[in-house]
Amino acid sequence: MPATDLDSAWFHSNPDRAYRLRRQTPGEAAQWSVPPGPGVTAWCIIRRTDGALEAFGLPDDDTWDDYDEELAGFFETLRGNAA
């Protein structure tokens, strides 16, 4: 799924960032083959270079740092490219 216009605008406003972490909209989460259940929030990481998106769920009370260094590794793990 490509990045949205809002994601593109975010990258334009944050030119130093390579990844964006955000919650998914209810419409995006509804497209999952198994939508997140109660108590789980749908999140995604978008990669600037190609607009690639990886979605994942976290328990509602979990938090996540949005540093590029952490997001890059997690993104690659989600893609199945981890070393």
Image: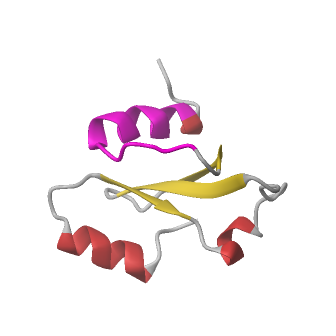
Report the span colored magenta: 62-77
- Whether residue 53 is visible here, answered yes or no, is no
Q: Return the x and y of residue 82 as percentages of the image width and height.
A: 50, 24
Residue at the (32%, 56%) spot, across then down: 49
Q: Is residue 63 magenta?
A: yes
Residue at the (47%, 40%) spot, across then down: 75
- Whether residue 72 is visible here, answered yes or no, is yes
81 vs 33, nearest the viewer: 33
Q: Return the x and y of residue 76 as percentages of the image width and height.
A: 47, 35
Whether residue 62 sits left or right of residue 71 in the image: it is right
Q: Residue reaching furthest top?
A: 83
Whether residue 13 sits left or right of residue 19 in the image: it is left
Q: Quadrant of residue 72?
A: top left
Q: Residue reaching furthest front?
A: 61
Q: Quadrant of residue 71?
A: top left
The colouring scheme, among rainbow, by chain, secondary structure or one colour, is secondary structure
Residue at the (38%, 59%) spot, across then down: 50
26 vs 79, nearest the viewer: 26
Q: Is residue 56 magenta?
A: no
15 vs 59, nearest the viewer: 59
Q: Return the x and y of residue 40 as percentages of the image width and height.
A: 71, 52
> Where the N terminus falls, by quadrant?
bottom right
Q: Return the x and y of residue 42 as percentages of the image width and height.
A: 64, 57
